[in-house]
Image (spheres, rainbow, N blue to C red):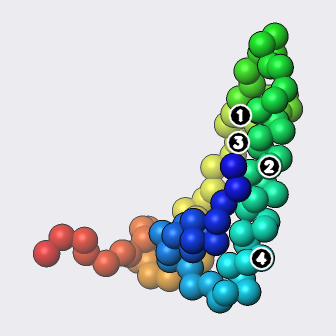
Amino acid sequence: MALSINEVAQVALLARLRLSPAELETFTGQLNSIVEFVAQLQELDTTNVEPLAHGVEVRNVFREDVRGPALSKEDALANAPKRNIDSFLVPAVLE
């Protein structure tokens, strides 16, 4: 199934892309190459292949959630753009 220049122009329109005639020809060739490759993949026998969510093994690499020392009030407020003696000052959200 080859894509025509008109079909690629329609996809470009849907994607809100302005393509010149030269770009349309280039992208038509590139998209046709991709479609041909997908057609080749569809010819493979995958009846005994288990579906995967990822191509490689994915595992949790997070560290243990260990409680550490707390910041002092002064350290926590050190870089605040606006603050008072013991809290952050933020603009009012409600009128």
Specify few, some or many for label 2: CA neighbours under 10 Å numbering under 14, 14-19, or 20 or more. some
Q: Is residue 91 above or below residue 46?
A: below
At 55% from the left edge and 62% from the top edge, which residue is drawn? 73
Callout 4: SS: helix
Side (left or right) of 75 relative to 43: left
Specify few, some or many for label 3: CA neighbours under 10 Å numbering under 14, 14-19, or 20 or more. few
Q: Quadrant of residue 25?
A: bottom right
Depth check, mark 1 against mark 3: the one in front is 1
Residue 33 in percent (x, y) is at 81, 57
Callout 3: SS: loop
**In this orientation, does residue 90 appear?**
yes
Quick one: label 4 or label 2, which is nearer the N terminus? 4
Q: Which residue is mark 2?
A: 36
Q: Pointer 4 and pointer 2: residues touching (CB < 8 Å)?
A: no
Q: Amino acid at mark 2?
A: Glu
Q: Pointer 2 and pointer 3: residues touching (CB < 8 Å)?
A: no
Q: What numbered label is drawn on residue 68?
A: 3
Side (left or right) of 41 relative to 51: right
Q: Pointer 1 and pointer 3: residues touching (CB < 8 Å)?
A: yes
Q: Which residue is mark 1?
A: 66
**In this orientation, does residue 15 appear?**
no
Q: Amino acid at mark 3?
A: Gly
At 71% from the left edge and 29% from the top edge, which residue is drawn? 53
Quick one: label 2 or label 3, which is nearer the N terminus? 2
Q: What numbered label is drawn on residue 80?
A: none
Quick one: label 1 or label 2, which is nearer the N terminus? 2
Callout 2: SS: helix
Q: What numbered label is drawn on residue 26?
A: 4
Depth check, mark 4 against mark 3: the one in front is 4
Q: What quarter of the picture does the C terminus occupy?
A: bottom left
